[in-house]
Image: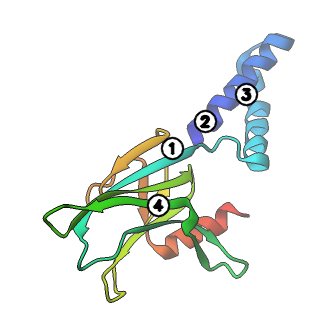
Amino acid sequence: MKSKLMKRAWNYARQGQQKHGGSVKSYFQQSLKMAWEDYKENKSMKKYHIINVVFDYNGRLYNEPWGAVITLDDNNNPSHDFSKAEFLGSMGMNSNIVKGDLMLMAQTGDVIAIGQKDKEGNDLSNDWFIILDGPEEFEFKLKHINEHLMPVSPSEAVKYLSEETL
């Protein structure tokens, strides 16, 4: 987010310099304020990502993996939006192994959760991440987190989300 904010501020500064003359640097302070206001008003600097999480698991023992975008409800409690994720997978012909991809649509700065339960309903994993800036589509395995996701605990995510909405 910071790099996009700075790029936008420098673009505003160059536009000011072209229109009114003088040094680009002399316009930067006001341009940074304008870029920050743009971001706060419409969050247009966020971009959407399609996150592809690769899974393979024993379909007899485990349920499908799930993904969700996390928001806060009116009481500042985390709320899971499962509508942004879908698991696309199938079981092998001669095995119980399910291979597939969990596809999740989210924006830069969003908090996401990815998890899976066993057939008895016990959580096997429930991992939370903040989406950092990155390509529009990226893939990872939970064991190999990439540079586009920052792992966070649920309490850290709630703190991050509550600060972002101020």
Name the residue: 66% across, 41% down.
45
Dot 4: few (<14), some (14–19), or many (≥20) neighbours within 10 Å?
A: some
Which residue does the numbered mark 2 point to in the structure image? 4
Q: Quadrant of residue 70?
A: bottom right
Query: Can you tell which mark lies on residue 111?
Result: none
Amino acid identity at mark 3: Phe
Image quadrant containing the N terminus? top right
Circle 4 sits on which residue? 86
Q: Horizontally, is 84 left or right of 124 in the view?
A: right
Earlier along the polypeptide chain: callout 3 or callout 4?
A: 3
Which residue is at the front of the view, 45 or 26? 45
User: Where is residue 130 drawn, in percent x and y?
Assistant: 49, 58
Q: Earlier in the sequence, mark 3 or mark 1?
A: 3
Q: Tags 1 and 2 in contact by the CB under 8 Å rule?
A: yes
Question: Distance between the Cα atoms at labels 3 and 1?
Answer: 23 Å
Q: Inspect the image, locate mark 4, and give the three-letter code of the amino acid beneath it.
A: Glu
Give neighbour class at mark 2: few <14, some 14-19, many 20+ (Cα, 10 Å): some
Most foreground residue, 14 or 55 = 55
Q: Which residue corresponds to the image point at 65% horizontal and 72% vertical from the top-left?
A: 72
Residue beneath disc 3 = 28
- In primary-sequence order, the first of circles 2 and 3 is 2
Number of marks drawn: 4
| Comparing labels 4 and 2, the label whose residue is closer to the camera | 4
State which mark lies toward you, 3 or 1.
Answer: 1
Identify residue type, mark 1: Asp
